[in-house]
């Protein structure tokens, strides 16, 4: 039986909390020309999407089709990428010349961090299933 989803959320929750605590003090990041609000909003958006896609992975891991989990991982990657790209476009259109490009780049780095963490969690579903099937 796979680990409960709540235990799978812990790495995502830990990453979210660490990034939030790091980027709350605005004065420190102003020296690097990074708007902490842009990074915090990107972090929240990526965290919420990652939680939703963890449910996708959970249901895909329970299916007997061998490609279901792979399809779920690819679908979640595309979903996260499109939602993040739309958010960046909306932010760029609203902020116009005052947009914070370093903050956008930090958000793109966060996208990669959440993606790697989410794939590791999803692969943990298959590893756990293989050990349970062997018993």
Image: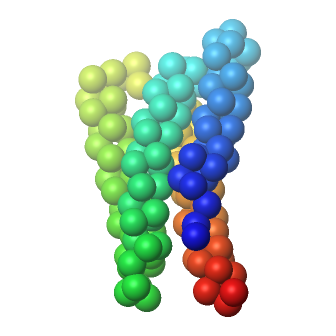
In the image: residue 97, left or right of residue 69: left
Rendered image coloring scheme: rainbow
Viewer can see residue 27: yes
Determine whether 14 is above or below 116 in the image. Answer: above
The residue at 46%/73% (across/down) is 61
In the image: residue 101, left or right of residue 75: right
Q: Nearer the viewer, residue 78 or 7?
A: 7
Q: Nearer the viewer, residue 68 or 32?
A: 68
* Residue farthest to the top, as pictured: 27
Quarter of the image for the C terminus: give it. bottom right
The residue at 65%/80% (across/down) is 132
Viewer can see residue 112: no
| Quarter occupied by residue 72 | bottom left
Quarter of the image for the N terminus: give it. bottom right
In the image: residue 19, left or right of residue 45: right
Q: Position of residue 44 (x, y in %)?
A: 48, 32
Q: Nearer the viewer, residue 80 or 49?
A: 49
Number of marks drawn: 0
The residue at 33%/29% (across/down) is 91
Q: Position of residue 103 (x, y in %)?
A: 54, 31
The residue at 40%/19% (across/down) is 98
Q: Position of residue 45 (x, y in %)?
A: 43, 36
Determine whether 93 is above or below 5 in the image. Answer: above
Determine whether 72 is above or below 37 in the image. Answer: below
| Quarter occupied by residue 128 | bottom right
Determine whether 103 is above or below 122 in the image. Answer: above
Q: Position of residue 52 (x, y in %)?
A: 40, 48
């Amino acid at each position: 039986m796979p680990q409960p989803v709540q235990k799978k959320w812990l790495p995502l929750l830990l990453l979210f909390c660490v990034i939030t605590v790091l980027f709350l003090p605005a004065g420190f990041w102003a020296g690097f020309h990074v708007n902490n609000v842009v990074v915090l909003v990107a972090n929240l958006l990526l965290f919420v999407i990652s939680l939703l896609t963890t449910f996708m992975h959970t249901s895909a891991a329970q299916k007997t089709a061998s490609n279901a989990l792979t399809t779920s991982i690819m679908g979640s990657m595309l979903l996260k990428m499109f939602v993040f790209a739309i958010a960046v476009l909306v932010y760029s259109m609203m902020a116009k010349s005052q947009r914070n490009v370093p903050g956008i780049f930090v958000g793109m780095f966060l996208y990669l961090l959440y993606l790697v963490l989410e794939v590791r969690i999803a692969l943990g579903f298959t590893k756990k299933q293989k050990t349970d099937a062997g018993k």
